[in-house]
Amino acid sequence: MHVVALLGGGPLRPLVPDMVTLHELIDAGDAPKGLALAWKALPKLASLISTVKPHAVLSTMTGTNLLVVLACMRARIRTRVVLREASSLVNTKSALKRQAMRWLYRHAAGLVAVSSGVARDLRGLGLADDRIHVIRNPVDVERLRQLAAVGLPPLMQDKTPYVVSLGRLTEAKDFPTLLRAYATSALRDSHYLIIVGEGEQRANLENLMRDLGLADRVLLMGAMDNPYRVLADASLHILSSRWEGYPNVLLEALALGVPVVSTDCPHGPREILDGGRYGRLVPVGDVAALAHEMDAELKQLSPGSPAVLDAHLPQIIASHYLALLDGACVEGSS
């Protein structure tokens, strides 16, 4: 098996097994951005595909998917291409990128959507329904529980009880709505708010925290290699996103027995929480509704369901991918 990383030196490099051949196309320290990065990587990827002559190629994320199709066309070899789309296309605002998806995704033997909502997005591009397969993300419950068994970080020692939100500090996660909801909720007096993640909106969020008088009640933890003890000890996990694909953090919270409140964003939360049965759903960007449901969830917890987690076992998800890469019918995945 060969694994190809567009940029070298990533934090997941140590997790690649010894029996896997890792190819890193571009040195991260000397990498351009956007189209310049794709243009630099294209001939290297095409040459690699031509040399390895793989039976099948699996790619993920829109930009990389487009690059892989072009590289396979340039390599001029017959291989089974499977593209995985992991996010709602609501954030794909570029008409050029959407047109490129319409054209290039047609060359794929299979398209993986991580949720039914993402599958609808792909159909909306005019892509053939019989090539679209819904294969949801896996969750390894035992591994999560092992990772959650470590001690709390020192910064957390005097911040209990607390509610938590895990996610990158970006527009998609809409942490300003969460901060405003927390500021008006009863939780402000009873629980700290911990946000785990890093991103370009940190400075804006710090300013908003000061404006709302939350500097002593909210802790921005930054990115963590292992956030699962922080998640496991939380009274509640809140997802305030504007859009997603299939947010694993909701599954991870449920696996650790942490109740959840989520925006009903495109896509994934409604599917994971069975329309609100296993956690509360609120409209995107609705500060008052989010504050109300956070308070309500702590007063009356939503029921958990082992069946939700059973459907996401890694071995089941892996079998769907292997069947699709082999060209077999992916039973129960679409």
Image (cartoon, rainbow, N blue to C red):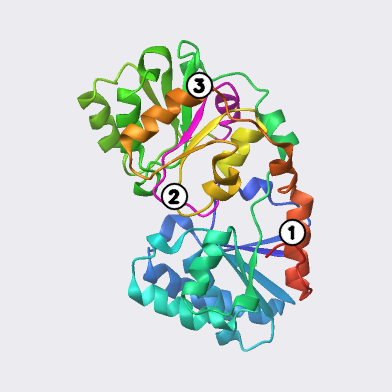
Element at badge 1?
A: loop
Element at badge 3?
A: helix
Is 25 covered by the magenta stretch? no
Residue at the image position 74 percent from the left and 62 percent from the top: 332
Give the left or right position of residue 84, taking residue 190 as reference. right
Residue for badge 2: 265
Q: Could you tell me residue 9's position as x and y percent?
A: 54, 52
Q: Could you tell me residue 253's position as x and y percent?
A: 59, 34
Residue for badge 1: 20
Neighbor class of circle 1 (other Cα within 10 Å; few <14, some 14-19, many 20+) is few
Give the left or right position of residue 220, taking residue 13 as reference. left
Q: Could you tell me residue 191's position as x and y percent?
A: 43, 16
Pick the residue in front: 107 or 181: 181
Vertical relation: 307 (above or below) 83 = above
- Count of residue discs: 3
Neighbor class of circle 2 (other Cα within 10 Å; few <14, some 14-19, many 20+) is many
Q: Amino acid at mark 2?
A: Cys
Comparing labels 3 and 1, the label whose residue is closer to the camera: 3
Q: Which mark is residue 288?
A: none
Distance in Å between CA atoms under marks 3 and 1: 45 Å
Q: Amino acid at mark 3?
A: Leu
Vertical relation: 64 (above or below) 88 = below
Tell me where residue 184 sits by quadrant.
Answer: top left
Residue for badge 3: 298
Residue at the image position 20 percent from the left and 26 percent from the top: 211
Pick the residue in front: 142 or 299: 299
Looking at the figure, which quarter contains the C terminus?
A: bottom right
Tell me the magenta residue range: 225-247
